[in-house]
Amino acid sequence: MSTYVYGIIRASHSPLRQDMDGIGDPPRPVRVLCRGELAAIVSDAPDQLRPKRRDLLAHQRVLDEAGAGGVVLPMRFGSASSDDDTVTRVLAERAEHFLERLRALDGTAECNIKANHDEEAVLRLIMADHDDIRSLAEANREAGGGTQEQQIRLGEMIAAAVQAREATDAELLQQALEPMAEAVSAGPQSTGWLANLSFLVDRGSADQFLAAVDELRGQHPHLGLRVNGPLPPYSFVDTPSLQHVEGGTAEAFGTAAAQPNG
């Protein structure tokens, strides 16, 4: 049976609960593999693993509980290796890098912010800020809706203004919160969000960071802000692929920042 990897910690990390359950149905018991100064949080991997909600939540729960006892380098959901020996060999081969990342991320947490627009509120702002759009809208209304060409033109002008406002608000969000963070990572763009940003913050000041998000929400009611965190620093592990090659076969388990801000 292959070995599923949740994250990497120091061997001196606070002990995990002995009854901690991981992924699978029934859930696989979580255990720790040590090699030198490092350890990997693992369990047996199911034969067929799919990104079901139950297992995604189990993966994150293990990392959250481990993170409460010290810094963790979180791995991507689905990260597995052929056996325990391969995992410990990778720990040994990449020890210098892992230890450097553990030192760099010690005492930190990740807060992911996704932002979108309240459509009606943004439309009111655009009408107030753009004389040409407002004038054309009023002319169309007085003309009983205007010609098809005028309607298309108005729609194009509004769409361009909304797109520009999205870029402006994404920059505003980052500039407002970046001073309170040690680092910022932009997640992949997706439909429905004008910004998808992860902030690396001092764990002790995470509440102040979240309070600043609330203040920003109050100052800009046209912005919808969804907050996820504090989390383990998924987006700041900076290790896209970890591989051990033996007999021409690559055994790998990969880290992923993609989980919260993907």
Image (tube, grey):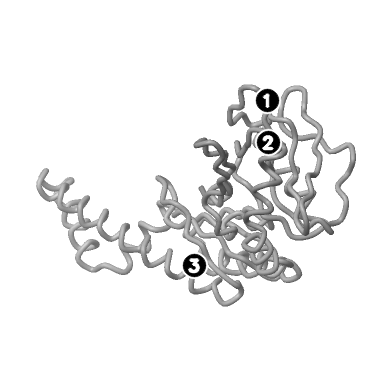
For marks 2 and 3, give the CA distance. Answer: 37 Å
Left or right of 92 on screen, residue 259: left
Is residue 27 shown above or below 111? above
Few, some or many residues within 10 Å of mark 2 (<14, 14–19, 20+):
many
Which residue is label 3 attached to? 173
Residue 106 % position (x, y): 72, 66
For marks 1 and 3, give the CA distance. Answer: 41 Å
- Whichever of labels 2 and 1 marks the residue nearer the N terminus, that label is 2
Which residue is label 2 attached to? 4
Residue type at tag 1? Pro
Q: Secondary structure at mark 2?
A: strand
Residue 252 % position (x, y): 57, 41
Residue that extends furthest to the bottom in the rendered view of this protein? 179
Which residue is label 1 attached to? 46
Left or right of 40 on screen, residue 125: left
Residue 204 occupies quadrant: bottom right
Contact? badges 1 and 3 (CB < 8 Å): no
Q: Secondary structure at mark 1?
A: loop
Left or right of 5 on screen, residue 175: left
In percent of the image, x 59 and y 58: which residue is there?
237
Is residue 32 shown above or below 46? below
Residue 31 % position (x, y): 81, 40
Left or right of 122 on screen, residue 10: right
Q: Secondary structure at mark 3?
A: helix
Residue type at tag 2? Tyr
For marks 2 and 1, give the CA distance. Answer: 8 Å
User: In the rendered image, which quarter contains the N terminus?
Assistant: top right
- Whichever of labels 2 and 3 marks the residue nearer the N terminus, that label is 2
In percent of the image, x 59 and y 44: which residue is there?
76
Contact? badges 2 and 1 (CB < 8 Å): yes
Few, some or many residues within 10 Å of mark 3 (<14, 14–19, 20+):
many
